[in-house]
């Protein structure tokens, strides 16, 4: 990395001679702390491989015997969400654009209340292992397979990004061996996930969440102290215009406003905490439905704390006046520069960073093994023995670990810009999956043809907008200074050289459509799936109430249209209750007993 030094004055800002960046180095203590993190994670996996039922059944390996308490589940939910990409990206976002992004915390309210009271009751009472089993119960096997394949595509791409990004940033700033870090992260995660199953994943998430919070807190405390105290930090960020006012601009093409973050963010949260298998699997592993709902409630304060730590860290970075053009290196460079000479603290933050990576990819391994086993293999081999199914699940978890390493290598070959492309793809896929589940849960007349068509259309529109945005952005972005890929501002500087615009200017026609804020992607694609799905369902013959599998509909329409006459509500299929025993028994008498399709409903009721 090359560093540019700037001298600032109220009138002008002058670039001084460019010097080679001085790489920071780990001490022995730092390496020991990083090694302890990996060893502890391995130890937890080994413990659950040798204790309890020793992961001999698929229920224990994939679902933790449905015996988890709300506290570890809630901490695991946070760890899965708080990836290394977020720990690196959020402080960089706050540093560059100010605190407007902090308003996404408002989205956490509905983003967690709706899953707690809508998605969890429906999915938990059906006693599922995979969230996509719901799609077969509600629609058909074809819809289930489409949903499963979409999720696998989404997670495989994201796994490579999550394991490669922190290793790349660390290598660029410290010279830490790139592929050594990638292999250590990927292999350790693969081993403990394969040995210990979901219990190991959840309990390592608990440990890794504590490490994440400790690492971020240490950086903030040291940064505030070195800057001159809280008042000095506040003075600098205030004078640097990094404290953003409430932006109520309703323009959906504005990157971050209150509406894009607080409203668009709700749909992003729903796609993560409502229907994503990695999170749903944790709800389903809880001992009772109450424990699952309580864990969702407990996530809220912890997520707010995680967001606050990341945002405050960005403000401390600004007050310390260190700036880098290259995003992945920004936070690492700041931390290593600030903590140099404090043995152990750089290692603690790196442990924090890799804890986030480990928790995210271990969740991905386990959830991918689950959906592959439950949705793609078991339906074709119903007579498979429990021992063989468990062994195959472990092989799948290990295989996805190797796929993760391969994706990290592909990410490395593609270059930095593709990191952003991959993250956008991850965001673009979540909205259509959310739309598919909403179509099934809230609209009883939606049929399987409408569901498949809606999902296909939603994904097509999503990729059209996303790829168009990337192309437009690439053609409209000004290049960085030719000689300087990063900048270093002196410790007392309070003004900053801004990045060239990250987002192309507003333009008419198709480019204006492409400039839709990425925070609206989930909402836009969700509604696309619902609207197209309903239109096709009505054109091909809406599903009748008696043909809908009991327990798969959340009575939203019945609540909203409670003022309508009973006959009209019945005609609109607004009266299907959630898990009513009499209705289920009558339904089975009407259509005949089909054990493989309805046993989930009966188990939930009894």
Image (cartoon, rainbow, N blue to C red):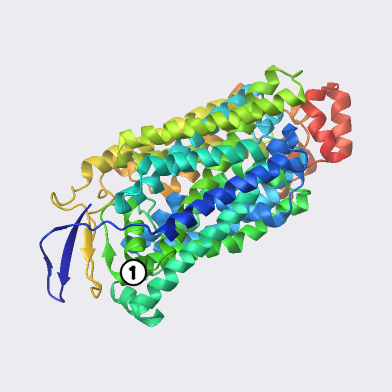
Residue drawn 50% across and 27% down? Answer: 456
- Where is residue 475 shown, x and y percent of the image? 22, 40
Q: Disc 1 marks which residue?
A: 242
Residue drawn 71% across and 25% down? Answer: 389
> Is 280 on the left-hand or right-hand side of 215?
right
> Is 14 on the left-hand or right-hand side of 100?
left
Tell me if I can see residue 543 in this picture: no
Residue drawn 70% across and 52% down? Answer: 117
Residue 354, above or below 18: above
Front position in the image: 45 or 136: 45
Front position in the image: 91 or 28: 28
Front position in the image: 65 or 20: 20
Tell me if I can see residue 551 in this picture: yes
> Which quadrant does the C terminus fall into?
top right
- Asked which quadrant contains residue 406, the reply is top left
> Is 530 on the left-hand or right-hand side of 136?
left
Number of marks drawn: 1
Residue drawn 39% across and 51% down? Answer: 252
- Where is residue 502 shown, x and y percent of the image? 28, 51
- Where is residue 592 shown, x and y percent of the image? 85, 21
Front position in the image: 566 or 317: 317
- Asked which quadrant contains residue 553, the reply is top right
- Where is residue 81 shown, x and y percent of the image? 54, 50
Residue 213, above or below 40: below
- Asked which quadrant contains residue 198, the reply is top right
Q: Residues within 10 Å of mark 1 (few under 14, many from 20)?
A: many
Give the SS element for disc 1. loop
């Amino acid at each position: 990395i090359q560093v540019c030094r700037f001298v600032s004055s109220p009138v002008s800002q002058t670039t001084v001679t460019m010097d080679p960046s001085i790489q920071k180095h780990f001490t022995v203590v730092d390496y020991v702390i990083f090694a302890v993190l990996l060893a502890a994670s391995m130890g937890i996996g080994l413990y659950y491989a040798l204790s309890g039922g020793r992961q001999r059944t698929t229920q224990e390996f994939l679902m933790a015997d449905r015996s988890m308490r709300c506290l570890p589940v809630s901490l695991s939910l946070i760890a899965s969400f708080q990836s290394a990409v977020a720990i690196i990206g959020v402080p960089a976002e706050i540093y560059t654009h100010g605190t407007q992004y902090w308003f996404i915390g408002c989205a956490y309210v509905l983003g967690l209340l709706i899953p707690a009271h809508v998605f969890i009751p429906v999915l938990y009472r059906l006693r599922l292992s995979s969230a996509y089993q719901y799609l077969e119960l509600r629609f058909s096997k074809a819809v289930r397979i489409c949903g499963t394949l979409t999720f696998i595509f989404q997670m495989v791409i994201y796994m490579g990004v999550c394991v490669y990004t922190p290793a790349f940033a660390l290598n660029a700033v410290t010279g830490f061996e790139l592929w050594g870090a990638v292999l250590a992260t990927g292999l350790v995660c693969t081993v403990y996930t394969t040995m210990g199953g979901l219990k190991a994943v959840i309990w390592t998430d608990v440990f890794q969440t504590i490490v994440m919070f400790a690492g971020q807190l240490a950086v903030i405390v040291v940064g505030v102290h070195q800057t001159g105290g809280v008042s000095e930090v506040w003075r600098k960020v205030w004078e640097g215009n990094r404290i953003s006012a409430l932006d109520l601009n309703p323009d959906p093409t504005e990157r971050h406003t209150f509406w894009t973050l607080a409203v668009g963010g709700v749909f992003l949260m729903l796609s993560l905490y409502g229907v994503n298998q990695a999170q749903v699997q944790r709800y389903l592993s809880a001992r009772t439905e109450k424990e699952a709902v309580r864990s969702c409630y407990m996530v809220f304060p912890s997520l707010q704390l995680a967001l606050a730590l990341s945002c405050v860290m960005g403000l401390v970075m600004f007050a310390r006046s260190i700036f880098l053009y290259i995003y992945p290196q920004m936070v690492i460079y700041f931390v290593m520069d600030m903590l140099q000479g404090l043995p152990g603290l750089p290692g603690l933050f790196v442990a924090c960073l890799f804890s986030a990576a480990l928790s995210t990819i271990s969740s991905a391994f386990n959830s991918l093994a689950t959906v592959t086993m439950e949705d793609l293999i078991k339906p074709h081999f119903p007579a498979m023995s429990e021992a063989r199914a468990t062994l195959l699940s472990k092989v799948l978890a290990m295989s996805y670990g190797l796929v993760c390493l391969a994706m990290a290598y592909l990410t490395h070959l593609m270059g930095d810009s593709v990191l952003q492309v991959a993250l956008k793809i991850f965001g673009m896929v979540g909205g259509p999956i959310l739309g598919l589940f909403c179509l099934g849960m809230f609209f009883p007349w939606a049929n399987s043809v409408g569901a498949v068509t809606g999902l296909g259309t939603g994904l097509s529109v999503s990729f059209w907008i996303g790829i168009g945005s990337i192309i437009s952005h690439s053609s409209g972005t000004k290049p960085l200074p030719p000689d300087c890929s990063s900048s270093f501002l002196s410790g007392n500087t309070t003004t900053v050289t801004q990045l060239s615009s990250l987002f192309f200017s507003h333009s008419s026609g198709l480019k204006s459509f492409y400039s839709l804020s990425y925070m609206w992607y989930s909402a836009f694609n969700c509604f696309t799936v619902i609207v197209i799905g309903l239109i096709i369902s009505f054109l091909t013959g809406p599903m009748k109430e008696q043909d809908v599998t009991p327990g798969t509909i959340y009575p939203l329409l019945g609540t909203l249209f409670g003022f309508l006459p009973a006959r009209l509500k019945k005609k609109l299929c607004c009266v299907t209750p959630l898990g009513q025993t009499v209705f289920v028994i009558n339904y089975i008498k009407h259509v005949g007993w089909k054990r493989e399709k309805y046993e989930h409903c009966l188990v939930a009721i009894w």
